[in-house]
Amino acid sequence: MKTFEMYTDLESRGILDETRQELIEHGTVQFPVAVYEEDLLNDPIYWHWHKEWEFGIVTEGEGIAAMDNKQYRLKAGDFFFNNAEVLHAAWAAVSGTVSMHVIVFHPRIIGGSIESVFWQKYVTPLNDNPHVRGFVLQEGEEMRERCARLVEQIWDKCTKKESGYEFQVRNDLSELTYLAFQHSQNELDTVPKKETRDAKRIKNMMLYIQEHYSEDISLSQLSACADISESECMRCFKRVIGMTPIQFVKQFRIQEAKSLLANTSEKIVDIGIQCGFQDMSYFSKTFQQQCGCTPTEYRKKVAEENQA
């Protein structure tokens, strides 16, 4: 994943408040907007959530955008919106280049104070609408081209950062928010209580994994933190994210290992241990299965890309 100066990396971990909510800022306090260029083939977006809104488009290839337990196959030009606190992920649907332009921002940049007409009339009804977990706009759907164009404009302005771009970005985000608000008025289907309950359980278990991934994690520990049985824990993971809890733990550990390999000079054996792998041959085998290369090869590849 490529990020740009002054923006926070999506993969940053471990900053939680007393309610276990992530406190990672996307952008800055003064300008809470971040843009990302995602390479879904080499760096899929793993399951996560945040308090900010997220708009994006597929720029090349075909990808899968997942929101809670729903999945959408998107082609170049397709638009998506993830509401605040919604569990989401994205990955390549085909081989070859699959890329996205993503904007993550806090709605206060367009809503102002909570007493303002913008916040009360538009932000709150969208942000707090339990029926709008997120949506996609695909070829042939109304507003798709307009929303995709706005995403590209915002992304371009944030990367170039020409004088006064903050005003232009805020204006474009306001227009994009109004379009999302308009679309949300048609979202009348009630989200089943089971889906909301499953998402909450998965979040609790994922946060436990984030805090304890360097340790042994058992199925009983995961199920306990969500106050469910082990069998329901298994079913919940399968329903929402399509894998077992153990598969998710391994995926999370490898993602953390990739970050350490790319951003530190720590020894590979120490990284493996830090990420919960006591057996280095198993670490290397698991890493190669998920990434298509060994930890050593991955570190070398990242170094070469940074020098290019």
Image (spheres, rainbow, N blue to C red):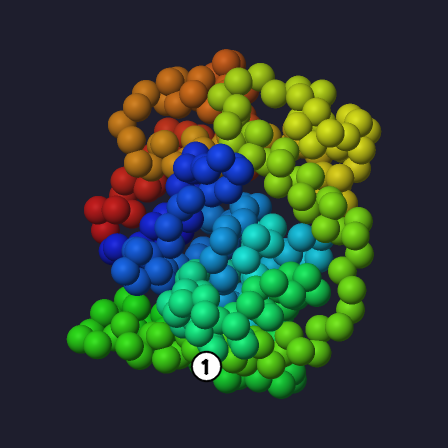
Count of numbered labels shown in the rendering: 1
Indicate whether 47 appears above or below 34: above
Left or right of residue 109: residue 216: right
Residue 20 rendering spot, x and y as whole percentages: 52, 37
Residue 262 rendering spot, x and y as whole percentages: 33, 37
- Residue occupying the point 62% across, 41% down: 203
Residue type at numbered disc 1: Glu
Residue 161 rendering spot, x and y as whole percentages: 23, 69
Left or right of residue 149: residue 261: left
Q: Is residue 75 visible?
A: no
Residue 292 rendering spot, x and y as whole percentages: 50, 38
Q: Nearer the viewer, residue 259 or 186?
A: 186
Q: Secondary structure at mark 1?
A: helix
Q: What residue is shown with label 1?
A: 175
Left or right of residue 243: residue 53: left
Q: Residues within 10 Å of mark 1 (few under 14, many from 20)?
A: some
- In the current view of this chain or complex, which residue is farthest to the left? 163
Left or right of residue 67: residue 172: left
- In the current view of this chain or complex, which residue is farthest to the front? 115
- Residue occupying the point 30% across, 56% down: 28
Indicate whether 83 appears above or below 260: below
Indicate whether 253 appears above or below 81: above
Q: Is residue 163 visible?
A: yes
Q: Nearer the viewer, residue 170 or 111?
A: 111
- In the current view of this chain or complex, which residue is farthest to the top? 278
- Residue occupying the point 62% across, 85% down: 142
Q: Nearer the viewer, residue 26 or 121?
A: 121
